[in-house]
Image (spheres, coloured by chain):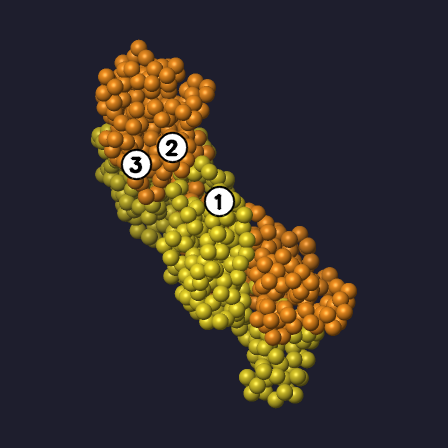
Chain colours: A orange, B yellow
């Protein structure tokens, strides 16, 4: 066992934060901790509850299969855990306890826990820490356990003191990891909503470079139809359009910075393919004052492609409005903006039948005119696409 | 000199600043006091241009930072020495300059104007082509750093480096989240994130507006509800399905006002099981109000398609599905005039029929009015 000094503790503390901000591989913390307090095995876990199995955040030098047998069966025989729960230690964030404080020797000596789980795995003494109590509003409950093998001394007062010194750092480090997780989760969930939108969304930094793009933006970038989207930013092939676009982007960026009051703008972009021009809007992003960042988000660009034939899913129309299969097919074709006669031709439907179907569609969708129906059907698709694709 | 408890407190404080970055100045002050100094700075510069990227100071006049960025950083012999010896974790005067040289140096002369003469600084590469420093400035009376002070400084350095990296990472992710939320807030559709019990975690502005309208759809502590029992049963079944069996779906929801039903879609959102978070998004809900008026204001249409004021007004009405006659009536426009305007606006928008025009205008990207932007800037985005 190494001598416990403030420097060795400070080293472990450093590792604790490295892991939290890095890959979350808590095994890397257990190794130096074990050598600090002279433990042979270490585990960081969230005890199982009604709605879940034991979750292990880190484990070091336990024999193969021990975790599995614990999660499958032995957690029920874990009288140390039961003792910690009974005494309320699992609720006390930062509480350090030895095995003998959890369960009296007489109860421990002949227990199934000791004889069938601890001993076969070479474990005898426990030094436990409640990293996060089970009433923590932010974190799942987290316990750390360090073990020594049979035939050794119980953990020293120095060891418990070292654990107490490290405890607040472990807690803070787990909250750091949780915050990073949280930001990542919400950003991705939000991003996945944007990915299902029919228009392109681009987020630009203060120098006009692209920070984020949704799926539709990638499609438009790939089409290369008058618009060049690269890591350097967005520009138009046509010079006059490009001048206008860059002016709008710069105006929006300056507004975000508070240096102007131009709320961005809107413009059409001609396409060499001769298809209907893209419609593009630029708006400033409200700037939060960064403390450390080099790049800051400054503007947002939306682009819509009027020729993007979002298909109105027939199944959706049937479910939401109770249309018959033929009615739904007709409605989906009409949603593209063609006249009734063209739609009827397209579906090899008699004009009279088409007219009858349309009447029924109007009734079921509570609309009176084709323009109104188109409006309703065009508003729907982005949402329905949304349920079709899985995240 | 600092005792073990003091060092422990300093280290703890550094990590507190790491997670609440507005505390960096306070921590800098504590470190600077413990070492013994008359001002401290935490900053980073571009390794090539030597432009200042960020700077946090304590007990240093703001103009010192401005002058430093404008000129003195570029001629700073301390930075130069560090650049020549990148493997050094910290540097102080006597490593590279004598007192006699200090007396004749432009940079030290400038520092002297603020009452500073000696320093110790930690340096590290904080990103690609980016160097970060923490430096404390000392008066002639405080003199050169002592061996004990150097040792303390050295002990703190790895924690400062790590703390800054954590602050940055959090800030970076905050920024990504804020940008994504901002984008979602501008959508015409409602977007709601639900946790694994169906409770509302966040909603965008459009969703908020639908709930505020309270036209048959409400959010409560336990989730989203319809005012109609049958609809609500269906809704809960749909949400439950998304949460438990990973299958989403779409349903219409009736409104007491008699307006067209809301259309609600639920999609499951799978996230890693092994997470620390107690609450996490488990489903995404999209809400559409088919009666929302297109948000495209008439002046935007004028800009976009070169419409005249009257044409734009007419187009805005036609986009809602109103018939030409009804629109002309509403605008107190002669039918003949309306017909002439429509012809012109069809031409300008490259459409031939009202249905096509509706399609074009409804799919226009969201445009935000300046007033809405101001409102939004007050909103706080926090984890």
Q: Earlier in the sequence, mark 2 or mark 3?
A: 2
Tag 3's secondary structure? loop
Residue A9 x, y percent position in the rendering: 31, 26
Q: Nearer the viewer, mark 2 or mark 1?
A: 1
How would you rate the neighbour count of disc 1 (Cα within 10 Å): few for under 14, some for 14-19, many for 20 or more? Answer: few
**Residue at which label 1 appears:** B244
**Residue at which label 2 appears:** A48
Q: CA distance from mark 3 to mark 1?
A: 28 Å
Q: Please tell me which residue lies in front, A10 or B196.
A: B196
Asked whether the residues under the numbered discs 3 and 1 touch, taking CB atoms below 8 Å apart as contact, a structural biologist would say no
Tag 2's secondary structure? loop
Q: Residue at x 59, y 77 (%)?
A: B322
Residue B360, by quadrant, is bottom right
**Residue at mark 2 shares a chain with residue at mark 1:** no
Q: Nearer the viewer, mark 3 or mark 1?
A: 1
Residue B44, by quadrant, is top left
Would residue B374 be visible to someone looking at this image? no
Q: Residue at x 41, y 66 (%)?
A: B214
Residue B361 x, y percent position in the rendering: 60, 69
Q: Is residue A370 left or right of residue A134?
A: right
**Residue at which label 3 appears:** A133
């Amino acid at each position: 066992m190494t001598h416990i000094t403030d420097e060795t503790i400070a080293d472990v503390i450093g590792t604790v934060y490295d892991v939290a901000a890095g890959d979350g591989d808590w095994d890397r913390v257990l190794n130096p901790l074990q050598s600090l307090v002279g433990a042979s095995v270490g585990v960081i876990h969230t005890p199982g509850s009604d709605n879940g199995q034991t979750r292990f955040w880190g484990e070091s030098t336990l024999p193969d299969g021990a975790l599995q047998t614990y999660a499958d069966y032995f957690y029920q025989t874990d009288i140390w855990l039961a003792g910690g729960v009974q005494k309320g230690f699992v609720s006390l964030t930062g509480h350090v306890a030895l095995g003998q404080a959890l369960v009296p020797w007489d109860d421990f000596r002949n227990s199934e826990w000791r004889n069938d789980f601890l001993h076969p795995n070479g474990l005898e003494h426990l030094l436990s820490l409640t990293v996060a109590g089970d009433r923590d509003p932010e974190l799942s409950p987290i316990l750390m356990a360090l073990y020594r093998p049979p035939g050794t001394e119980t953990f020293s007062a120095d060891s418990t003191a070292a654990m107490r010194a490290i405890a607040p750092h472990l807690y803070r480090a787990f909250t750091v990891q949780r915050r990073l997780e949280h930001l990542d989760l919400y950003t991705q969930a939000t991003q996945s909503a944007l990915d299902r939108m029919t228009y392109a969304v681009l987020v630009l930094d203060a120098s006009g470079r692209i920070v984020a793009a949704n799926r539709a933006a990638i499609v438009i970038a790939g089409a290369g139809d008058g618009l060049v989207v690269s890591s350097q930013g967005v520009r138009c092939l046509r010079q006059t359009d490009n001048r206008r676009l860059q002016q709008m982007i710069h105006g929006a960026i300056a507004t975000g910075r508070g240096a102007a009051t131009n709320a961005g703008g809107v413009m059409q972009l001609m396409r060499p393919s001769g298809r209907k021009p893209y419609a593009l809007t630029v708006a400033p992003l409200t700037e939060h004052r960064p403390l450390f960042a080099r790049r800051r988000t400054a503007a947002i660009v939306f682009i819509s492609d009027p020729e993007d034939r979002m298909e109105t899913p027939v199944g959706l129309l049937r479910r939401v409005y109770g249309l018959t299969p033929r009615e739904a097919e007709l409605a989906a074709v009409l949603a593209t903006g063609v006249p009734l006669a063209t739609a009827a031709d397209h579906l090899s439907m008699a004009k009279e039948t088409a007219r009858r179907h349309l009447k029924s569609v109007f009734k079921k969708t509570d609309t009176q005119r084709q323009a109104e129906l188109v409006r309703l059907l065009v508003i729907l698709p982005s949402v329905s696409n949304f349920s079709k694709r899985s995240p | 000199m600092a005792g073990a408890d003091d060092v422990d407190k300093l280290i703890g404080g550094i990590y507190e600043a790491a997670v609440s970055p507005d505390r960096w100045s306070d921590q800098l002050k504590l470190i600077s006091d413990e070492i013994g100094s008359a001002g401290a700075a935490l900053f980073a510069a571009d390794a090539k241009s030597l432009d200042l990227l960020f700077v946090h100071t304590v007990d240093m006049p703001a103009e010192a930072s401005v002058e430093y960025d404008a000129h003195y950083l570029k001629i700073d012999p301390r930075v130069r020495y560090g650049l020549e010896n990148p493997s050094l974790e910290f540097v102080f005067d006597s490593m590279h300059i004598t007192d006699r040289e200090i007396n004749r140096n432009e940079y030290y002369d400038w520092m002297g104007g603020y009452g500073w003469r000696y320093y110790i600084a930690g340096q590290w590469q904080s990103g690609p082509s980016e160097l970060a420093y923490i430096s404390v400035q000392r008066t002639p009376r405080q003199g050169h750093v002592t061996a004990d002070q150097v040792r303390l400084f050295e002990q703190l350095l790895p924690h400062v480096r790590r703390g800054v990296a954590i602050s940055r990472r959090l800030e970076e992710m905050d920024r990504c989240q804020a940008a994504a939320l901002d984008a979602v807030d501008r959508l015409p559709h409602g977007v709601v994130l639900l946790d694994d019990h169906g409770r509302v975690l966040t909603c965008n502005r459009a969703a908020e507006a639908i709930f505020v309208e309270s036209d048959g759809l409400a959010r409560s502590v336990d989730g989203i509800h319809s005012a109609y029992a049958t609809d609500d049963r269906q809704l809960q079944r749909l949400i439950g399905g998304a949460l438990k069996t990973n299958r989403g779906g779409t349903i219409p929801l009736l409104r007491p006002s008699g307006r067209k039903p809301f259309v609600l879609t639920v999609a499951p959102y799978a996230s890693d099981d092994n997470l620390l978070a107690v609450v996490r998004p488990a489903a995404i809900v999209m809400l559409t109000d088919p009666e929302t008026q297109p948000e495209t204001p008439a002046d935007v249409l004028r800009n976009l398609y070169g419409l005249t004021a009257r044409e734009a007004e007419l187009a805005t009405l036609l986009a809602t599905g109103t018939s030409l006659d009804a629109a002309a009536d509403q605008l107190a426009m002669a039918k003949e005039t309306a017909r002439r305007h429509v012809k012109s606006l069809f031409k300008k928008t490259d459409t031939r029929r009202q249905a096509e025009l509706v399609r074009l205008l409804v799919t226009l990207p969201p445009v935000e009015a300046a007033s809405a932007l101001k409102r939004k800037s007050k909103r706080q985005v926090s984890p």
